[in-house]
Amino acid sequence: MPHGESWFSLLPFHENAMALAHYFSKPVTEDGLSWIAHEPIALQHVYGAIFIIILLLVVGLITSASVRESTKRKELLPEAKLTIRNFVEIVVGATFKMMADIMGEKAARYFLPLIGTCAFFILFSNAIGLVPGFLPPTGKLNTTFACGTIIFLSTHIYGVKEQGFFGYFKHFFGPIISLPALPLMLVFFVIEIISHVARPCSLGIRLMANMTADHMVVAAFLGLVPFLVPVPMMLLGCVVVVVQTLVFCLLSTIYISEAIKHAEHH
């Protein structure tokens, strides 16, 4: 399969989608021609993200139906074998425990839908890259930076909601708020702004770089020796998939926890 392509390239509307992407993404000259007529447009991460969303919707419906059935039958113990519902409960339970250890159970319950959604989307997006012929949506900065931006906006929105506008942003000026300390306050403010703006960038770049490198290594071994030899690399890839999901959710939880608890320290 050509570099940068996946099974999604076989979709019947792929060519039309590529043409539409070229039309809206390239500036044109006065004669209506594109400046760079043959530069490829990356749509694989868009296809992949849509596929993951549909897959998660199906997983959610199956899990919901299983929970309703268990409630109807008054079954308290989970099934002995690994099922979709059990897998979902393991991921949700692990995510909640990690969040509760950082921000407490009350805040963890409130933010679980946000961090849990990120966990499932990133985990499945990472994992699909281990399937030959597929590209991970998280291998593109467009996808990972979007996830980081959501966390960035949530951090400040809930920080302001929890502490008020002035109560939240005053910590950007440091621990001492007074006129004599104004020069130091301005230095603190610049440092804090740079730190906060860098957060979605670091979240996106870290995830994208690791998943791109992991996919390239696995693809290289599959291309050289398609049998047995790539297995250790794929096992290592499974570890990378889980670790990168954990790192993103862990840092996101820390950022939000700091935003909603600053009032206790100032």
Image: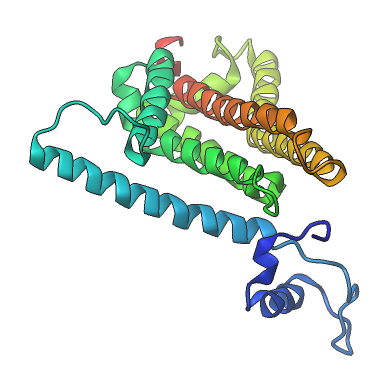
Exactly how many numbered labels are in the figure?
0
Q: Position of residue 261 (x, y in %)?
A: 42, 18
In front: 14, or 170? Answer: 14
Residue 112 visible, this orientation: no
Residue plotted at (43% across, 19% down): 98
Q: Position of residue 173 (x, y in %)?
A: 59, 20
Q: Quadrant of residue 182?
A: top right
Vertical comparison of 155 with 43: above or below: above
Would residue 32 appear left or right of 144 to someone viewing this image? right
Q: Position of residue 197 (x, y in %)?
A: 66, 34
Q: Quadrant of residue 172?
A: top right
Residue plotted at (64% across, 33% down): 203
In front: 84, or 27? Answer: 84
Residue plotted at (64% across, 50% down): 137
Would residue 101 appear left or right of 123 to someone viewing this image? left
| Residue at the limit of the structure toward the bottom, as seen here | 31
Would residue 68 appear left or right of 82 to someone viewing this image? left
Residue 15 visible, this orientation: yes
